Image: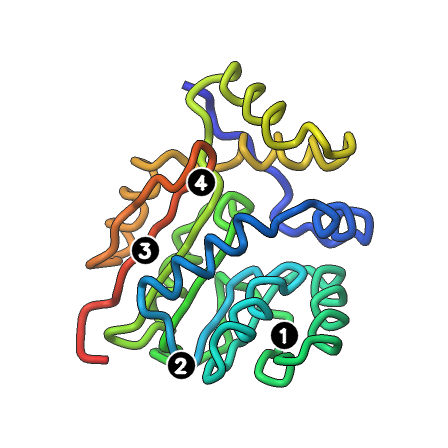
C-alpha cells in the first residue's frame, strides 16, 4: 500500500497559485457543482479552502439565491479569486476572506451548505477541519467534501499522472503527483468521519482519482 506523504498545507507563493490556476479544472469543478445541486445545496454556503474561487462563482452563476463565502489561508490564491469575483456577473453574492478552516470565525450552525474541494489532502491532521465543517453546518444542512484519492501503489500513481497531467508543465505535474501522494484512501476518510462524529454521511468513490464525503446533518432544516 502506498503510504501517505504530506505536502505543504498552504500553497501561498504566487508561482504555486498561478500554476494551480492555470490547470484545467473545468470538468471536475462542473461535476462538483452538479453533485452539490443533487444533494440539495441551498441558502447560505461556505467553501473551505476556496483557492482561486472558481467553484463559488460557478455555483453563484447556477443558483440565483445562493450567498457564498469562500475562505482560504493562501493570500495569493485569494488575490486571484478577488480578481475573478470582480469580473463575474454574480460576484456580488460571493465574498472571500482569509480564515483557517481548522478554526473558523463563524457561529455554530451558521451555514445551510458547507463544501470543500481538494483541500483535505493538504491538512496533516484533518480531524479539526472535519469537526469545524460539521460545527458550522445547520441541522439538515448539506455537506460535500471532495478530495483526491491516494492510489494503492506507485504504478497506479504514475499511470494517473501520465493520464491526467500529460498536457501540464513540470511544475503542474509535480503538484498533481504530490497531491495524489498526500491524499487519503476511502476507508481512512470513513474512519475519520466516524471519529469526528459526522453522522449520516457516506464516502463515495467518484472517479479513478476522486472521492467524496457527503450527506446531510441529521435534524430539522
State yes or no: discs 4 and 3 in contact (Cβ < 8 Å): no
Q: CA distance from mark 4 to mark 3?
A: 13 Å
Q: Work out whether 191 lies above or below 61.
A: above
Q: Which residue is mark 3?
A: 214
Q: Which residue is mark 2?
A: 43
Q: Residue at x 40, y 81 (%)?
A: 43
Q: Which residue is mark 1?
A: 96
Instruction: Give residue 98's position: percent from left, percent from top.
Output: 64, 70
Which residue is at the front of the view, 143 or 105?
143
Q: CA distance from mark 4 to mark 2?
A: 26 Å
Q: Which comes sooner in the sequence, label 2 or label 1?
A: 2
Q: Residue at x 38, y 34 (%)?
A: 185
State yes or no: discs 2 and 1 in contact (Cβ < 8 Å): no
Q: Quadrant of the N terminus?
A: top left
Q: Secondary structure at mark 1?
A: strand
Q: Secondary structure at mark 4?
A: strand
Which residue is at the front of the view, 12 or 31?
31
* Disc 3 crowd, CA 10 A, few/some/many (<14, 14-19, 20+): many
Q: CA distance from mark 2 to mark 1?
A: 17 Å
Q: Secondary structure at mark 3?
A: strand
Q: Secondary structure at mark 2?
A: loop
70 horizontally vs 107: left or right: right
Q: Which comes sooner in the sequence, label 3 or label 1?
A: 1
State yes or no: discs 3 and 1 in contact (Cβ < 8 Å): no
Q: Which residue is mark 4?
A: 210
193 horizontally vs 130: left or right: left
Q: CA distance from mark 2 to mark 3?
A: 17 Å
Instruction: Give residue 103's position: percent from left, percent from top.
Output: 49, 67
Q: Which comes sooner in the sequence, label 1 or label 4?
A: 1
Amino acid at each position: 500500500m502506498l503510504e501517505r506523504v504530506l505536502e505543504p498545507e498552504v500553497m501561498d507563493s504566487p508561482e504555486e497559485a498561478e500554476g494551480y490556476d492555470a490547470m484545467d479544472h473545468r470538468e471536475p469543478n462542473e461535476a462538483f457543482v452538479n453533485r452539490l445541486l443533487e444533494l440539495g445545496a441551498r441558502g447560505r454556503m461556505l467553501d473551505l479552502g476556496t483557492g482561486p474561487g472558481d467553484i463559488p462563482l460557478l455555483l453563484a452563476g447556477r443558483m440565483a439565491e445562493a450567498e457564498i463565502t469562500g475562505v482560504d489561508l493562501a493570500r495569493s490564491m485569494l488575490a486571484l479569486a478577488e480578481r475573478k469575483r470582480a469580473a463575474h456577473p454574480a460576484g456580488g453574492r460571493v465574498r472571500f476572506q482569509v480564515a483557517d478552516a481548522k478554526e473558523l470565525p463563524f457561529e455554530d450552525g451558521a451555514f445551510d451548505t458547507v463544501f470543500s474541494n481538494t483541500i483535505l489532502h493538504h491538512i496533516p491532521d484533518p480531524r479539526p477541519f472535519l469537526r469545524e465543517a460539521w460545527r458550522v453546518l445547520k441541522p439538515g444542512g448539506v455537506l460535500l467534501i471532495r478530495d483526491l484519492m491516494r492510489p494503492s501503489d506507485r504504478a497506479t500513481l504514475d499511470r494517473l499522472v501520465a493520464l491526467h497531467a500529460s498536457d501540464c508543465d513540470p511544475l503542474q505535474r509535480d503538484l498533481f503527483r504530490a497531491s495524489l501522494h498526500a491524499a487519503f484512501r476511502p476507508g481512512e476518510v470513513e474512519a475519520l468521519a466516524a471519529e469526528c462524529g459526522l453522522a449520516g454521511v457516506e464516502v463515495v468513490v467518484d472517479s479513478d482519482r476522486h472521492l467524496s464525503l457527503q450527506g446531510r446533518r441529521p435534524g430539522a432544516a
